[in-house]
Amino acid sequence: MKRFFALIVCSAMLSVMSGCGGPPAPAPAPVANSSPKEAAHGPHGEGPHGGAVTDWGGGAYHVEFTVDHDKKEATVYIIGGDEKTPAPIKATSIHLVINDPMTEMDLAAQPLETDPAGTSSRFVGTHATIGIVKEFAGTISGQIDGTPYTGDFKEEPHDAGHEKK
């Protein structure tokens, strides 16, 4: 009888101890993040400048990564939801990470002639890594009106009839 009573008491204590542990901790605020596989509106093709396009913040913005291997220069264009129209932002630089070979660089604003004063839809930087002729993949990050944005891109091989810069 004592064993039966001890078993009931232990079972009751386990039930109480495993019960309510309080509400779960709130999730941290998400960074506006996207990549080609996460884009809800489908895959992206080649951008208006011939580069790799990825989503930047749920479709409100897109970024297009282009390279000029001869100049060892990377250019990123900020384009709108239509993936064609320049979308100038108030930023002096954005950050580029190339995965292989691992390279990080800040791209400086070089506004297009049509960008309003104090904004830019084009960001440019040079690095020896960009001189390597290959398809690059990496991450582009920056801020728009205090909100951080990041997007993963991957260049795809071009058709034989299409010359790459």
Image (cartoon, grey):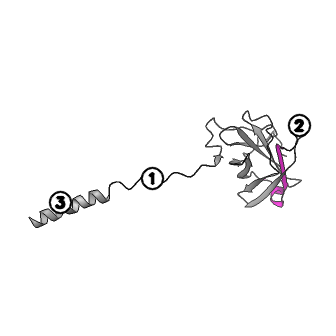
Q: Please tell me whether mark 2 sits on a helix, a strand or a loop.
A: loop
Q: Which residue is mark 2?
A: 114
Q: What's the mark number on residue 108?
A: none
Going by the numbered disc 3, the residue's amino acid type is Ile
- Can residue 12 be seen by looking at this rendering? yes
User: Horizontal placement of 60 versus 74: left or right?
Assistant: left
Q: Which percent across, then down, holds residue 149?
A: 69, 48
Q: Earlier in the sequence, mark 2 or mark 3?
A: 3
Q: Residues within 10 Å of mark 1 (few under 14, many from 20)?
A: few
Distance between the Cα atoms at labels 1 and 3? 30 Å
Q: Nearer the viewer, residue 139 or 4?
A: 4
In the image, the segment drawn in magenta is: 115-133
Q: Which residue is mark 1?
A: 24
Residue located 72% across and 37% down the image = 45
Q: Residues within 10 Å of mark 2 (few under 14, many from 20)?
A: few
Q: Is residue 33 magenta?
A: no
Q: Which residue is mark 3?
A: 8
Residue located 83% across and 45% down the image = 122
Q: Nearer the viewer, residue 50 or 74?
A: 74
Q: Please tell me whether mark 1 sits on a helix, a strand or a loop.
A: loop
